[in-house]
Image: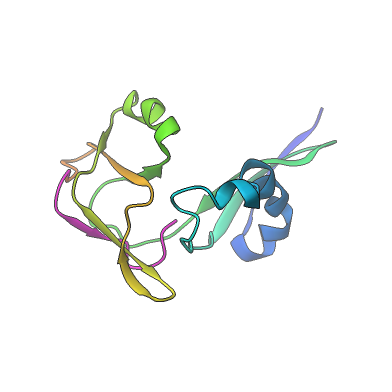
Amino acid sequence: MSIEIDVLNGGASWPMVEPLFKAVWPPDAVEKLPWAGIVFAHAELRVLVQAEAEGVVCHVGIYRREVRWNALLFCEPHNAPFYVGRGWKPFEGEIYAEQPAGRIRFDAIAPYVHDIRRAPRQGVIDLCGLPW
């Protein structure tokens, strides 16, 4: 068995990972989720894991943003216990993000912070662009 790991341009790699997105989040399932109408940023880079027979089996999108505070994570409720068990804490303030129609309060997916260095748990965080 052969496995390759590649780092590719986000836009150029989209055709390779789109089938994974559709398998995990089929359009008929997405339309029922709280974040169905949200426009998300496209990854600038992607790390792809490819198996010889299956093709792309996993990927991670990399997004570059200017950050003033520690890590910020958005996760769906069923994933929260995994991250909380690893030290992530709920952010109880307000999150803002850009959308095609303008700036919105982003509350479709719960935010978490990690106390690497005094992460804020309240206040206002502006994503300064589309959510990721």
Q: Is residue 8 left or right of residue 86?
A: right
Segment tinted magenta in the rendering: 121-132
x then y, percent, for residue 1: 82, 27
Q: Is residue 46 on the magenta stretch?
A: no
Percent x, y of residue 80: 38, 32
Of residue 83 and residue 31, the one placed in the foreground of this image is: 31
Residue sitting at x 32%, y 61%: 127
- Kindly identify the residue that appears in the image at 45 percent across and 53 percent down: 35
Q: Position of residue 77 (x, y in %)?
A: 40, 35
For the view shown, which residue lies furthest in the right direction? 53
Query: In the displayed structure, would residue 37 be above or below residue 91?
Result: below
Chief SS of the magenta region: loop
> Residue placed farthest to the bottom in the image?
101
State the image coordinates of residue 94 (x, y, percent, origin top left): 21, 55
Q: Is residue 88 left or right of residue 49?
A: left
Q: Is residue 6 visible?
A: no
